[in-house]
Image: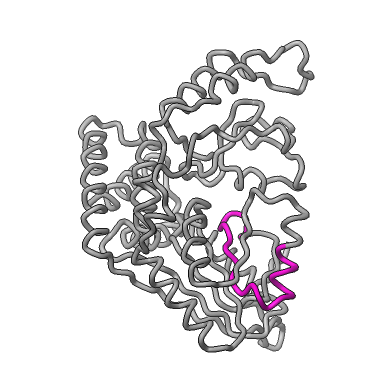
Amino acid sequence: MLRRTKESKDNDGRPILTLPPTDVQIIECEQSEAEQDFYDALFQRSKVRFDQFVAQGKVLHNYASILELLLRLRQCCNHPFLVMSRSDSQQYADLNKLARKFLDMNPHSASCNQIVPSKAYVEEVVDGIRRGENTECPICLESADDPVLTPCAHRMCRECLLSSWLTHSCGLCPICRQMLRKTDLITCPTESQFRVDVEKNWKESSKVSKLLDCLEKIRQSCCGKKSIVFSQWTSFLDLLEIPLKRRKFGYLRFDGKLAQKQRERILKEFDQTNDKMILLMSLKAGGVGLNLTAASHVFLMDPWWNPAVEEQAIMRIHRIGQKQTVSVRRFIVKDTVEERMQQVQARKQRMIAGALTDEEVRSARLEELKMLFR
């Protein structure tokens, strides 16, 4: 099948599609002294654990744990509250109820096509949640954000799972291919997302300050241009709502927790009204199947392991129907893991053309992890 892209041309050498240009820039953020001290302490602690895995020769055996270390460092680049306020070590009040729901499942009542998890497996999953473990999402290969449990006892990002379904109400489990309904998903229990009162103790991080400066310039220009702020973490979107409210920015929010009718209402309001000029959007929820040409400013708050995910999000704005130049701003914190992530991505792009053996892939992955913790 012939695949056409924006760069495709007709037989006469003319572009088959003419769109306004994109202006892509990287905004480098420099941490304050307090942020830098906090990040350095977190990095050193994470590096000690990583070096232990290297010394034991068990790096790839602990890949999920290493991803979680990197996740905390990346979240710290956005705002220290995302790390210092987590409740990972808390005991979860709903775990016993959750375990009973699985363990009391009657295997004889399941259909012949339904896979019933074993008691030992369910107990292992529940114990992992109790210990605060954050497993790798099988879809995005990141530590699961806003994780849900399926009836087949698999854990993954809520938005990753819902976006993989053909319909909003049901779809297949990406692990065992069992049919799932949205109403059957169980939110991994948590007492509180933040241990501290973030509104009372609110302080802007360097990255948040840069974003607010950009949004303020757009508002002061009186050009009527709308903006979309992408982040892969819904908890960071929660934090962004605090300064937006205080500065009286009109905004809407779009993430995977919304029902289909709510999604349609928010997109319609963003498209047709001028009092809500900012849309806070989860990168996973906004990357596929949406038309967001009402906006012309895109802010990517955190780098993604796979640049194609970011490109898909940008393509929701830069597509047929867009009349204005699309401004894309990528935020990177200097001298942090975010800078090294860019180097890893550039290295991966150079390797794509080569056919690698399994052993070469494992070796390359190990080298990439060492680059991130150097």
> At x 40% / y 42%, what residue is drawn?
195
> At x 42% / y 32%, what residue is drawn?
133
Q: Is residue 229 magenta?
A: no
Foreground of the two, 69 or 346? 69
Foreground of the two, 326 or 76? 76
Rendered position, 137 above or below 125: below
Task: Count every numbered label the image shows and give the total.
Answer: 0
Q: Is residue 166 left or right of residue 46?
A: right
Locate residue 100: give its quadrant: top right
Q: Is residue 280 magenta?
A: yes
Q: Position of residue 203 (x, y in %)?
A: 36, 61
Q: Is residue 317 left or right of residue 64?
A: right
Q: Position of residue 136 (x, y in %)?
A: 48, 38
Rendered position, 227 above or below 131: below
> At x 71% / y 30%, what residue is drawn?
178
Residue range highlighted in magenta: 266-286
Name the outermost residue toward the front. Answer: 200
> At x 76% / y 40%, what residue is drawn?
170
Foreground of the two, 210 or 344? 210
Q: Position of residue 62 (x, y in %)?
A: 35, 33
Locate residue 98: give its quadrant: top right
Q: Position of residue 163 (x, y in %)?
A: 66, 49
